[in-house]
Amino acid sequence: MTVLERFAARFSERAGRPLTTYDEVWQASVTDLPGFWRTVWEFFELDEVAQAPLADGDAAVLADDTMPGAVWFPDVRLNYVDVVLRRAGQPGEAIVGLDEDGVRTAITWAELPARVGAVAHALRQAGVGSGDVVAAYLPDIPEAVIAFLATASLGAIWSGCGQDYAPEGAAGRLAQLEPKVLFSAAGYRYNGKDIDKRADSAELASLLGDDVAHIMVGEPGEVAATPWSQIVADTDHLPEPVKVPFDHPLWVLFSSGTTGRPKGIVHGHGGVIVEHLKCVAIQSDLDESSVFFWQTALSWMMWNYQVAGLLGGATIITYSGSALYPDADRLWRIVADERVTFFGTSPGQLQASRKAGLHPGADHDLSALKLLGSTGSTLAADLFDWVDENVKHELPISSISGGTDVVSAFAGGTTGVEVVAGELSARYLGVGLESWSPSGEPLIGEVGEMVVTTPMPSMPVSFWNDPDGQRYRNAYFAHEWEGEGPAAPVWRHGDWVTVTERGSLVIHGRSDATLNRHGIRMGSADIYEVVEAIPEIGEAFVLGVDGPGAKYWMPLFVTLVPGAELTDELTARIAGEVKTKLSPRHVPDEVVVAPGIPHTRTGKKLEVPVTAILAGRSEVNVDPRSVDDYSLIEWYAERGRAHRW
């Protein structure tokens, strides 16, 4: 019996009627939020780790359902780390670390408390207590997970940043928080090269302030930092997690910050615990027998999501290195060697595997693999087919939609629900997700704005340095609907979505980067799915630019695979594919070979700011520190200047 089936049986008892289909469970979960989340609490026996048992009554679960500002579990006190460490008695490995050279390190469940306790003791010695901030500038390594757990155990607040950021870019985020301690690494290996980060780490420490204590994984050399090895050698201290209120800050994640100062998004202990247990265990069927590997980095919310595997008792895999070095088969070898059961990746990695002609299922033993996850951008239907043919036949694919904003998923694949190529299988339990018309009417089978009409426990507790909550409200609740609009505020996420009659979803791209040709709207993701399936195309980038006198320019920028050329025949083929598979009105005005496609550090294409740049808007100011290759921005700006309306 799957975790979802066992949960549905428990929830049916509370509902007083059998909930036999996923849609019935979902409907009950959004119409009875207190009953649903109480069932989650009881199903995972969270009374074991709380200061006192959860009181009776709906108000003990949801005292106020107003968005923003819903009040969840108002009298609960608990700690994220207690939920993890109650697993310490089970056998096997808790965290496995791999680097690009294949060096493997492992921390068993039995070893985990001493590691966490040693680092927590060092933090206390540095003056860290409840409500203080600890910052990290680290690769995706086991030490990062241990440092996070140690921080959270004290009731302190964690915030991490990958070492691909330059010191100034990292400081643009972390310095806002005024941390007391910085964790960094002496370096890492990427694309076959050793990257020394000691000087950058020292510079970041200086940018964070004179009083910041600095702890470094690896040998500090001339840098004034305490070696990690010295700290974890002291094994005489077991963790003593501090019980904190349900909404006590657990971590601060940051928005991409491409056109302004990155926003610090604060999430609480309790909201993250219940949401992540729901997502990784109930929706994804993770348990003590699972091995969970999502290729990620500390700057991306999927790092936080992967750590949640520990909440469910799974072994998690961290990986420091390139996903494509020495070749596109790198991650598939990890999946096979580590007997991974849930592998999370991106459409880009799957696309690279396909274009490299890989056949992972034939070349490796993937018999342990039970679920493939994908996020970061929309997973095209043809990639579902490629996985089925080349990875594993009838392997469930969980293409998920969520975000840093809720550090969770709104929708995705789930146990027992049919996977349809190009679709997200279901709205996740407890998520009142709908597609709305411009006037706020729910739509089925039509493209509309993605909204969430019911509160979620992992919606932000607050934004950092936003005392009156105005920036938070403006980010999600300030959209102006046509006509009277909704009676109560709803969360507008900024994506175009279709909710099908089956309850599945199709994501069409950002609604603030809509392609609007001749009054017909289309999401960029629809274009990418068609164009990036063409063998010669490496990546596509389509923009809709408003010009003077109601003129409209829709260029398609592409990168090509090695050896390909943009011939007249290829240009015509691109236009033909868009015309026949999508719409003749959305054939691009021109196809241009670009030196690259600009992304945020977490891999999202910079459609909105680059559209504004092409339109010649002078107020657009893209932060170089938030872009993977800032040199591309000027190239696109020049294209905009050269365009003749």
Image (cartoon, rainbow, N blue to C red):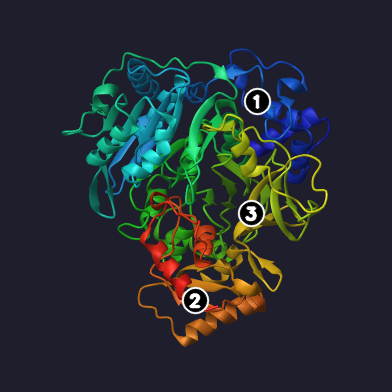
Point 49% across, 38% down: residue = 253
Point 59% across, 71% down: residue = 547
In the picture, the disc for residue 313 is none
- Discs 2/1, front: 2
Q: Earlier in the sequence, mark 2 or mark 3?
A: 3
**Dividing the picture into quarters, in which one does residue 394 lie?**
bottom right
Q: Earlier in the sequence, mark 1 or mark 3?
A: 1
Identity of the residue furthest to the left in this view: 222
Query: In the image, residue 526 lies at what x, y percent?
Result: 61, 66
Mark 2 crowdedness (10 Å alpha carbons): few <14, some 14-19, many ≥20 = few
Position of 636 compared to 183: left or right? right
Point 56% across, 67% down: residue = 529
Contact, CB < 8 Å: mark 2 with mark 3?
no
The residue that disc 1 covers is 41
Mark pair 2, 3: CA separation? 29 Å
Point 81% across, 52% down: residue = 441
Give the vertical position of 532 relative to 305 (above or below): below
Position of 47 compared to 357: left or right? right
Give the vertical position of 445 relative to 150 (above or below): below
Which is more toward the observer, 644 or 105? 644
Position of 394 compared to 74: left or right? left
Mark 3 crowdedness (10 Å alpha carbons): few <14, some 14-19, many ≥20 = many
Identity of the residue furthest to the bottom in this view: 568
The residue that disc 2 covers is 643
Mark pair 2, 1: CA separation? 58 Å
Quadrant location of the C terminus in the rendered image = bottom right
The residue that disc 3 covers is 495
SS at circle 2: loop
Tag 1: residue type?
Trp
SS at circle 3: strand
